[in-house]
């Protein structure tokens, strides 16, 4: 009878399907698992067309389909996980290198700059720009804040950087920027506009 025909294709389909299913969860290796499942599915179809070992062929086909689905799903999960990890890494790098300055100022840090002051004594002219920074996040943070002095035409005069180390949540700290200004820049910087160029957060 047709139902009693034996088929090596059905056996191969079942074996390949089982191997493919058992290895379908393993990253990289499951590329081969998908190929095994595909071949197993083809063998199962051949066996069904020949009407041989129908039960085994159907079982092999089902297992191969399941193996293929598991491979695709596991690879999607791995891909999504890697993409999330890469996005997180890039975001952290931007935060540490000034690429997320606007976000940091909006969510983590307040910076208030006072009026630039000069005090002339017997030997030198002392200068300072009072700056108050506040960590408005809920965690201890360290900030590097680059401030530039610009002329009315927008051209840069000079820059200075403030380092606020280990500010606790809600903590404020006062700093003095531009304390060492060369004499050739002094007149320009007296009338300068000060703005934040870059903020890094650690």
Image (cartoon, rainbow, N blue to C red):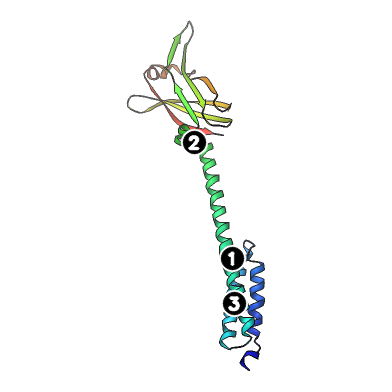
Residue identified by numbered label 1:
71
Please name whichever residue, 157 or 95, is drawn nearer the observer in this view of the structure. 95
Residue 151, position in %: x, y?
Answer: 36, 24
Instruction: Measure the C-alpha gap from mark 2 to mark 3.
Output: 55 Å
Give the mark nearer the N terminus: 1 vs 3.
3
Quadrant holding the N terminus = bottom right
- Secondary structure of residue under mark 2: loop
User: Looking at the image, how many numbered discs can be counted on the residues?
Assistant: 3
Q: Nearer the viewer, mark 1 or mark 3?
A: 3
Residue 111 vertical placement versus 50 (above, below): above
Instruction: Measure the C-alpha gap from mark 1 to mark 3.
Output: 15 Å
Q: Residues within 10 Å of mark 1 (few under 14, many from 20)?
A: many
Quadrant holding the C terminus = top right
Give the mark nearer the N terminus: 2 vs 3.
3
Residue 100 vertical placement versus 35 (above, below): above
Q: Quick one: which residue is furthest to the left in this view?
A: 153
Residue 79, position in %: x, y?
Answer: 55, 57
- Secondary structure of residue under mark 1: helix
User: Residue at 55% of width from left, 24% of height from top?
Assistant: 171
Determine contact: label 2, label 3, CB under 8 Å: no
Residue identified by numbered label 2:
98
Residue 94 vertical placement versus 187 (above, below): below
Q: Which mark is residue 61?
A: 3
Instruction: Measure the C-alpha gap from mark 2 to mark 1.
Output: 40 Å
Q: Residues within 10 Å of mark 2 (few under 14, many from 20)?
A: some
Q: Is residue 60 left or right of residue 175?
A: right
């Amino acid at each position: 009878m047709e139902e009693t025909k034996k088929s090596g294709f059905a056996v191969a389909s079942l074996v390949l399907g089982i191997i493919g299913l058992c290895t379908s969860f393993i990253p990289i290796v499951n590329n081969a698992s998908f190929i095994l499942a595909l071949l197993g599915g083809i063998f199962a179809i051949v066996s069904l067309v020949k009407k041989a070992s129908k039960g085994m062929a159907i079982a092999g086909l089902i297992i191969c389909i399941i193996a293929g689905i598991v491979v695709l799903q596991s690879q999607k999960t791995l891909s999504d996980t890697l993409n999330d990890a890469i996005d997180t890494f890039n975001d952290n790098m931007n935060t540490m290198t000034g690429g997320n300055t606007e976000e940091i100022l909006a969510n983590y840090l307040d910076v208030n700059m006072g009026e630039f002051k000069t005090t002339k004594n017997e030997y030198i002219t002392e200068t300072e720009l009072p700056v108050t920074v506040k960590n408005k996040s809920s965690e201890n943070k360290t900030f590097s804040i680059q401030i530039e002095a610009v002329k009315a035409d927008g051209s840069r005069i000079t820059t200075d950087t403030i380092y606020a180390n280990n500010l606790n949540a809600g903590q404020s700290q006062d700093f003095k920027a531009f304390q060492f200004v060369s004499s050739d820049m002094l007149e320009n910087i007296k009338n300068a506009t000060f703005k934040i160029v870059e903020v890094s957060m650690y």
